[in-house]
Structure formats: structure tokens, C-alpha cells
Amino acid sequence: MEKVTQFSIFLANKAGVLSRIFREMAKAKVNISALAMMDAAEHGVLRLVTEDAETARRTLGGLNLPITETDCLAITLANRPGAVADVCERLASEHINVSYLYCTTGASGGKTIAVLKVPEIKKAMKVLENHKPGTRDKKPSVRSPRVLTRR
């Protein structure tokens, strides 16, 4: 779990704008660890979290697009049903609102990364760090498949 910088880029809804952003990030060797894309009638909003915020900031700044930066919380979770529900329930139990969230798929080790916008990142981190894992948090044992033979 860590505090990350999220970039929100406001885009015109026209061909080539999105590919230009991704091409420039690739040229600068900026790896994107999470993203979400939303659209409205006249524009889209691309939210990005990268592995190198400083290089991303310079690269995006050179594109002459409206950009904002927001501190968010990135949490590595087991990729299983209920993982996000557990996080949201723990935060809600301490009256911490989640403004929005999005998740990646296929992070290393079969995990997923959830990016959350919460009003109090330090408080949210403390709540989530103090959580004692329950039975749902434990990885289920893997059974060997039964081999069926035909007679």
C-alpha cells in the first residue's frame, strides 16, 4: 500500500489524441501501472498512475493538454471475489468515504492493484494496515485435479 500520484488528463473526443499520449509515454519509457478512461459528450478524462511520476509529469506537460494531479492510495489485493468489498467495508467502518476507485488486472503474482481516491490518505492507510487478516483473506488451498479414467 502506498500513496501515488494520479494524473488526470482532459482530452478532446477525437481520433489520435489518446494514442499520442500513450506513444509519448512509451518514448519516455514511462510504465503505466494503472489507468481508467471516462468520457462525456465533449471530452474524456484519462486517469493514470505510473511507476515514475516525475518523468510522467515532464512528458505529459509537453503535450499541451489540461492535466491535474491528485494523491491517491494504491493497494495490492488478492485477485479474488470480495477483495475490494473488504477494503471498502473497512474504510466505511471508520467513516472514510471512497470518492472513486479503479483496479488493474494481472499485476505480478496474480494480484490486482486498486487505486482509491479518499479524503484522508494517512487515516485510510492506518485503518487498512491495522486490519487483521480473516479467513477470506487467506489464499485458498489448491487441490490437485482428479484424473478421470475411462474403462
Image (spheres, rainbow, N blue to C red):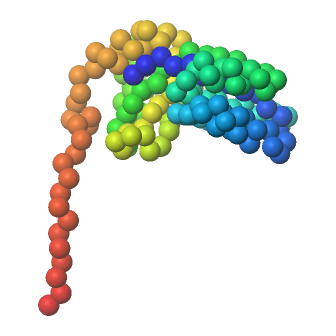
Q: Residue 143 in the image: x percent, y percent?
A: 17, 57
Seen from the viewer's position, the closer of residues 88 and 126 is: 126
Location of residue 134 (image quadrant): top left
The residue positioned 70% from the left and 25% from the top of the image is: 59
Q: Is residue 34 left or right of residue 95?
A: right
Judge whether 60 appears above or below 21 on screen: above
Q: Quadrant of the C terminus?
A: bottom left
Q: Quadrant of the N terminus?
A: top left
**Figure disc tally:** 0
Q: Residue 93 in the image: x percent, y percent?
A: 38, 17
In this view, the residue farthest toward the left is 151
In this view, the residue farthest toward the bottom is 151
Does residue 40 appear anywhere in the picture? no
The residue positioned 52% from the left and 27% from the top of the image is: 51
Location of residue 12 (image quadrant): top right
Q: Residue 5 in the image: x percent, y percent?
A: 57, 19
Seen from the viewer's position, the closer of residues 64 and 24 is: 24
Judge whether 66 appears above or below 22 on screen: above
The residue positioned 67% from the left and 36% from the top of the image is: 27
The residue positioned 39% from the left and 40% from the top of the image is: 108
Does residue 132 appear anywhere in the picture? yes
Q: Is residue 36 left or right of residue 60?
A: left
Q: Residue 115 in the image: x percent, y percent?
A: 51, 27
